[in-house]
Amino acid sequence: MTIRSKSIVAIVLTFTCILVTLFMICRFLLLNNLIAIETQNTRQDVERIEKTIGYITTNLAHATADWAYWDDTYNFIQNKDPSYIETNLVESTFTDLELNLILFIDKDGIAVYSKAFDLDLKKEIQVPSEVWTQISEGNTLIKSASSTSETSGFLLVDGFPPILLVSLPILTSDDTGPSQGTLIFGRFFDAKNLDQLSNITSVSISLTTYKDFTSRNGYASINFSAKNENEIIIKPINDDTITGYTVIHDVYKNAGLVLGIELPRSIYHEGQKSITYILISISSVCVVFGLIAVIEAEKQGLSRLKRLANTVERIANSGKISGRISTVGKDEISSLGANINRMLASMQRSEDAISERAEHLQVAVVEAQLANQAKTEFLSGVSHELRTPLTAIIGMAQLLQKKYYGVLNEKQSEYVQDILESSSHLLSLINDVLDLAKIEAGKTKLEMDQYSIRELIGSSVLIVKENAVKKGLHLTVEIAEEILNQNVVVDKRRFRQIMINLMSNSIKFTEPGGKVVVTAAIKRGVLEVGIADTGIGISPEEQEKIFDAFYQVYSGTTGKSPGTGLGLSLAKRLVEQHDGKIWVESEGIGKGSCFSFTISLNLAKQVSEGSEKKALGE
């Protein structure tokens, strides 16, 4: 793809990213804010309707109080005078007060007067039997002789709409007692009342029993809290309608009804329209500015770059560095052309300098080798200087531990043990540094001899077995007898050093309860030894660097067993001195690992041939 095409694509992608970013901002900020406003408005409408129902209840309570706190009512409940009924409890009383139910109950809980009235049909109906069931002695609706409190709320009766009740004690006109009974006024809260309430509030309202509401499949995703106190749930049904629900308690203060409203999502739709208009406007602006940017880029640089590329290609195809590029102007493209011209002029001079630079590089290589040798000698010298006092420290600590200078207390013994362990660990690290330095300096000489594989493996495992047992690991050797009975020519000390380094590494990075397994086999003229574990595993990236000097695998256990990162690097060099190779296999972190190395069996043949010659007197 040419620079011109890339530039146009970059401009298009830039403006596309701007559009997408603006869309996301509008979608998740502006629209979400509008949704929050819509939710708040719906919540306020639910609260407003709750307050309206409260006002209706208050008005009904005032009407009930006018009758309950009246001397005529007080006398009637005592003497049951029929003239009170004929004069006051007429049809107009029900219609004027919009009542469907009036109950007069004396202080003994006996109904003195009861009547239910259908306001639509303008006729008396039977008092629901369940009303009598719920109104019993000790019920919250029945007032005691000393009671002056009001009880109001909805009463749920099967086969009838919810009944809004107000219960008051019957007192004298000056609100004194004792109470002679209870007066209950009730109003059916039916569809007609809901329609009137909807007209007043301009909101579509529904009133459902709590039991029916919670059992409907359509409301399965709407869950009120256990207390249901003042909880309002807002839920959009679709893109056109949003609903709000709250619990209305019955006369017994239990969850009795669920008030629901439905509102059109006008704010949400207006928000979507606004976002659409904004995106269309921004898109138009982006297209215009994009076209201007493409035209200006073409005019100012893209066409000139194309001519420059054609000229350079023509010079390259001709093979004549005498060609030059015309430079017009003082911008970056002109400067590039001038620089290319200077580059062509200096190419010949550069060829002459190549040989000189090669000599300088050769000198640099020699200097680097000398520096590496100096580093090795420095490490060797420092290690020797450290080992001398360290040996004395270990010796003195051993004398203290063996109580040559007197009995030690428990704390002193613990300190001496810490000194011995730390000094031995440090001495091991110094020996690794010395061994690595000798190998890099080419001063390591192998003492080759013939040994049985059983002896080599067994003596190596014996050294580290105690550490494995202390850590709670299972260290096992799974090698066939015919392999163990074979002989191999190696430097015994170096072979054991390789084995100990690899097994110690596996023990170090395996959690308690894990396993370390030693295997061996003879394949294609080499002895292949493997140490597998169920430890922390090694990532593919670290497998490439794990045999580098001073490299350490990061893990949660490294802090517990610090090291220098020389063990695996030293093992690799010792294996290579035996004409072998070493590698690691692991499926990844947490899946264990297997270190394997090979020892050439040709070394054994060379020693056998030498031994035969010596036996023949050669």
Image: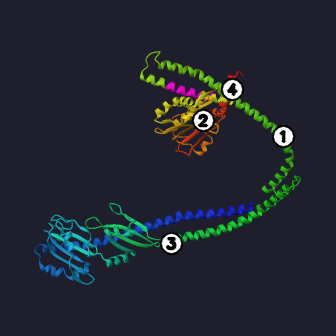
In this figure, which residue is indicated by the disc labeled 2?
A: 568
In this figure, which residue is indicated by the disc labeled 4?
A: 610
Identify the mark nearer the N-term, 3 or 1: 3
The nearer-to-camera label among 3 and 1 is 1
Tell me the crowding category of disc 4: few under 14, some 14 to 19, or many 20 or more residues within 10 angstroms, Cα based.
few
Q: Is residue 225 magenta?
A: no
Measured in 3D between alpha carbons, the distance from the residue under mark 2 to the one under mark 3, in whole angstroms, is: 69 Å
In-front residue for pair 441/108: 441
- The quadrant in which the N terminus is found is bottom right
Task: Report the number of discs.
Answer: 4
Q: In the image, residue 244 lies at what x, y percent?
A: 40, 68
Q: Amino acid at mark 2?
A: Leu
Q: In the image, residue 98 lies at what x, y percent?
A: 26, 78
Magenta-drawn segment: 418-434
Identify the mark nearer the N-term, 1 or 2: 1
Q: In the image, residue 129 lies at what x, y percent?
A: 20, 74
The nearer-to-camera label among 2 and 3 is 2
Identify the mark nearer the N-term, 2 or 3: 3
Q: Is residue 424 magenta?
A: yes
Q: Residue 575's quadrant in the figure?
A: top right
Measured in 3D between alpha carbons, the distance from the residue under mark 4 to the one under mark 1, in whole angstroms, is: 49 Å
Q: Main secondary structure of the magenta part?
A: helix
Q: Residue 328's quadrant in the figure?
A: bottom right
Measured in 3D between alpha carbons, the distance from the residue under mark 4 to the one under mark 3, in whole angstroms, is: 98 Å
Measured in 3D between alpha carbons, the distance from the residue under mark 1 to the one under mark 2, in whole angstroms, is: 41 Å
Q: Amino acid at mark 1?
A: Ser
The mark found on residue 355 in the picture is 1
Q: Amino acid at mark 4?
A: Gly
Identify the mark nearer the N-term, 4 or 1: 1
